[in-house]
Amino acid sequence: MVDINSYEKHFLFIKGEIEKAFQKIPLNKTPNYLYDPIQYVINGKGKRLRPILVHLVGQAYSANPADLMKLGIAVELLHNFTLVHDDIMDGDDRRHGQKSVHNKWDDSTAILSGDALFVLAQLSLKGLSDIIHQRFNEVALTICEGQGMDKEFENNSSISMGKYLIMIGKKTGALLGLCAELGALLGGLSKEDAHNLFEFGLNLGLAFQIQDDYLEIFGHESNMGKSLGSDIFAGKQTALMILARDNDSNKWEKFVNAKNSISDYQSYFVKNGIKTGTETIIQHYIYKAEKGLKVINQDKRNHLRQFTTMILNRTY
């Protein structure tokens, strides 16, 4: 039986060490135009789930802690690079409960600071093996592909659930897959065995993104750190929208054209079984992720199981 209290203590310890390492990232002081926004992002209230996953997998295979921290910092900087640019592209004014970079400064500042975050991520990988660098950059490009698909899919009612899953697999799932894969490689696993851990992270990422779609409708605005329904009102494809369209396209089209409020969307999704259907899909990918943990010895997988449970039970 897993000791949940022990896991929470371990989780918080890792998060605390990551926060300390983040504050030690070497940054120049000038120009302020560049470095003030970067420091603002570094000081933000992100969940740090990705570097934590790097550590949990790496620790399962006794990877070097210093290398895990380098990699953890790199993936979190990569993640923040994507968020800064994503907020510009989507016009989102808030991120992690505070103004997004382009909203606090302007688009040009956000573009430049986002670019620099990606460079800092690369610099954080110094001293790690060529395969780590290669996979990091391959997945970085995959994430960009996912973002491109996301923009192409906006206001396109022909997008199927299959296409949507490919898109979020690239945009969200691939980075969590990378965290698990590279943590395993640092622990000495073969490429093949590490790829099995990539699949674990990928499925976890699919569950995470669909959960994000769900919480964007049924969460609490104060927890989410952004306005509820922003993706739907922007015409983005979400799991709930696609399920609603597949369930009854004519009924859904009439509903959307009526310019409803977020509470109306909540009621529609509940009454038409969309809420329950989305919960089922989330559970499916959590199950697939947990099934992928079978490649890890029983005594080493408990913290990762708790990590997947935390993803499923999160409220923001």
Image (cartoon, helix red, strand yellow):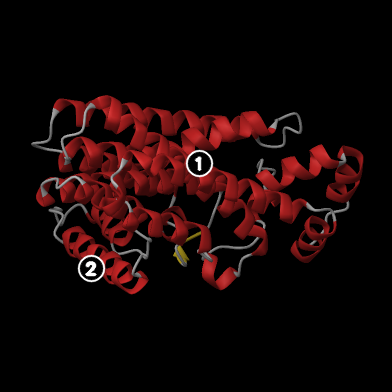
**Is residue 50 shown above or below 95?**
above
Q: Give the Cα distance between marks 1 and 2.
A: 28 Å
Give x and y (percent) for residue 132.
Answer: 21, 31
Circle 1 or circle 2, nearest the eye: 1
The residue that label 2 is drawn on is 13
Give x and y (percent) for residue 23.
Answer: 18, 62
What amino acid type should be assigned to the residue bearing mark 2? Phe
Q: Is residue 271 left or right of residue 135?
A: right
Q: Is disc 2 surrounded by few (<14), some (14 to 19) or many (20+) residues within 10 Å? A: few
Residue 5 position by quadrant: bottom left
Q: Which residue lies at the image location 22% right of the left edge and 49% below the top edge? A: 60
Q: Which residue lies at the image location 53% right of the left edge and 38% below the top edge? A: 168
Q: Quadrant of the N terminus?
A: bottom left
Q: In this view, does 152 lie to the left or right of 260?
A: left
What amino acid type should be assigned to the residue bearing mark 1? Lys
Give x and y (percent) for residue 90.
Answer: 56, 46
**Label 1 vs 2, first from the N-terminus:** 2
Residue 4 position by quadrant: bottom left
Q: Is disc 1 surrounded by few (<14), some (14 to 19) or many (20+) residues within 10 Å? A: some
Pick the front one: 233 or 11: 11
Q: Which residue lies at the image location 43% right of the left edge and 52% below the top edge? A: 106
The disc placed on residue 288 is: 1
Q: Which residue lies at the image location 29% right of the left edge and 71% below the top edge? A: 6
Q: Can residue 176 be seen in this view?
A: no
The disc placed on residue 108 is: none
> Disc count in the image?
2
Give x and y (percent) for residue 237.
Answer: 66, 40
**Is residue 3 shown above or below 279?**
below
**Is residue 207 shown above or below 3?**
above
Residues at marks 1 and 2 touching, judged by CB atoms closer than 8 Å: no
